[in-house]
Amino acid sequence: MTKPRIVIVGAGFGGLAVARALRHAPVDVTVIDRHNYHAFLPLLYQVATSGLTAQDVAHPVRSILRSLPNARFRLGEVCGADLDARWVALQGGEHIPFDFLVLAAGSTTETWGNQSVADHALPLHDLEHALAVRNRALSCLERADATADPALREELLGFVVVGGGPTGVELAGALAELKRHVVPHDFPALEGAMRVWLLEGRSALLPSLPPRLQAKALLQVTGLGVEVRLGALVERVDPTGVWLRSGQRIPARTVVWAAGVRGEKLAEELGLASGQSGRIAVDETLAVPGHPGVYAIGDLALLKGAERLPQVAPVAIQQGQAVALNLLRTLRGHPPFPFRYHDKGSMATIGRNRAVALVFGWELSGRIAWWAWLLVHIVFLVGFRNRAAVLLNWAWNFFTYDRGLRAVVGGNPIPDLALQRSEKGDASVARC
Ligand SMILES: Cc1cc2nc3c(=O)[nH]c(=O)nc-3n(C[C@H](O)[C@H](O)[C@H](O)COP(=O)(O)OP(=O)(O)OC[C@H]3O[C@@H](n4cnc5c(N)ncnc54)[C@H](O)[C@@H]3O)c2cc1C
């Protein structure tokens, strides 16, 4: 007898949780992802600021699935499906049939319809983004060190992070540490000249934390030298800076947009995206209404009645485990269970010895929160090699105040057009 075919789209936190929970079940599992690696997104900001390398936070999916006897991997981007005929289509035209489908394709950056943001700000949502931010930041420092034009230098040394959630706070803190500990050694002429801005539209940072921790986070991040602007709404981004609705302009060649997420475009491609968030509405058992045997989980799913559930890894993991259980119950003819989220807390690190955390209702800040943050991230990282590499890099960064790889690999990503405006050359001089 053929075993039920379970197809999981996405090898992120949610998709892998489903595959792992089904490891002993009498089913055939196929995990499809457009990358051949699982990326540990919570540490992307460290890749973006040279604290870690891309390899430290990525793990091959095939090696993760190796220990799951009933699972196999397919590299490919799902771009369509017939949910009644029960297949998904990969780019290139191949169809993969399924009996049960779990959509776990995650999310992407939300630009709120602002085309200038899409054109000129850098997202931070996958490994390529993190490398692009790193290249931009390092290239700006190199160029600033070489230019005599004060206006251009100010733009090159301006770093703006938009969005005061955990990603924005962590990235701004890491950039500020780069300014304090690395720039003075690598670029002595630039010491003190780099500026890091953190813009947040609301009246506080880290909206998911209690007000006392929000206030502490603000103190810690400003203590590092980050210029925080609360209630600051971005009107427009251009290649040379950010315009606020208040009329203020902040000169910056590096603008990172961390102000919102929306469902991956797959939801739209399948005609399942609901509302403005672009996520797939699911019922309380995580099933997609009207499509028996089809589920959505993690960042891609919008759970009815629990719309305010955060788009974080623990939600995706718990939903993955819940879907695996419901799928097996369905196969056995039992009714599925409704999903309940067990919230163990949230945390954000701001820099060396600085963090805020809400853990099982306990409010922690400073050094103890920082250690809790380190511990949680090491535990959740996939793979022994990654854990060892990250620990080694962190120890190196901590004791030497240095950063790892500061190589610009992949070209100079500063928009050249804008540079030429300020760096016009003499027409009689031959240029390469
Ligand atoms: C910069 C950043 C920092 C974060 N920090 C934290 C944190 O500190 N703590 C925390 O709990 N959460 C954090 N999050 C959120 C957390 O990473 C997400 O909530 C979590 O990854 C969601 O899991 P998922 O399985 O739904 O999606 P993901 O983990 O994003 O996985 C989705 C997978 O689907 C694949 N995919 C997408 N579309 C397709 C397609 N069409 N075909 C094939 N494959 C596809 C992708 O390649 C990816 O591997 C952070 C997110 C970001 C971006």
Image (cartoon, rainbow, N blue to C red):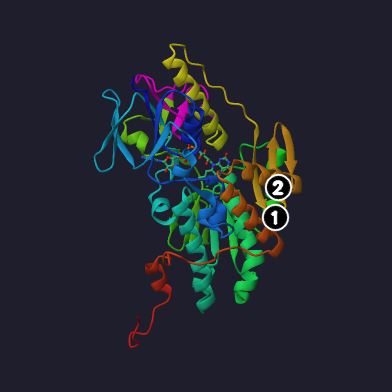
Part of the protein shown in magenta: 282-309
Q: Residue furthest left?
A: 93
Mark 1: which amino acid?
Arg
The residue positioned 52% from the left and 27% from the top of the image is 321
Quadrant (top left, top right, bottom left, bottom right) of the C terminus: bottom left
Which structural element holds mark 2?
helix
Q: 10 Å neighbourhood of mark 1: few (<14), some, or many (≥20)?
A: some
- Indicate the secondary structure of the residue bearing disc 1: loop
User: Hey, which residue is sitting farthest bottom in the picture?
Assistant: 428
Give the percent coordinates (x, y) of residue 259: 51, 45
Q: Pinpoint residue 314: horizontal percent, then vertical percent.
A: 57, 34
Q: Estimate how packed mark 2 is, as few (under 14), some (14 to 19) or many (20 or more) residues with alpha carbons within 10 Å.
A: many
Q: Which mark is residue 352?
A: 1
Where residue 342 appears, as percent x and y from the top left, is: 61, 26
The label number, if any, that marks residue 370 in the structure image: 2
Residue 273 position (above or below residue 116): above
Q: Rounded to the nearest whole Å, what is the CA distance between mark 2 and mark 1?
A: 8 Å
Q: In percent of the image, x 48 and y 35: which residue is there?
A: 16
Q: Are marks 2 and 1 in contact (CB under 8 Å)?
A: yes
**Vertical placement of 159 versus 301: above or below?**
below
Membership of 26 in magenta stretch = no
Residue 242, numbered circle: none
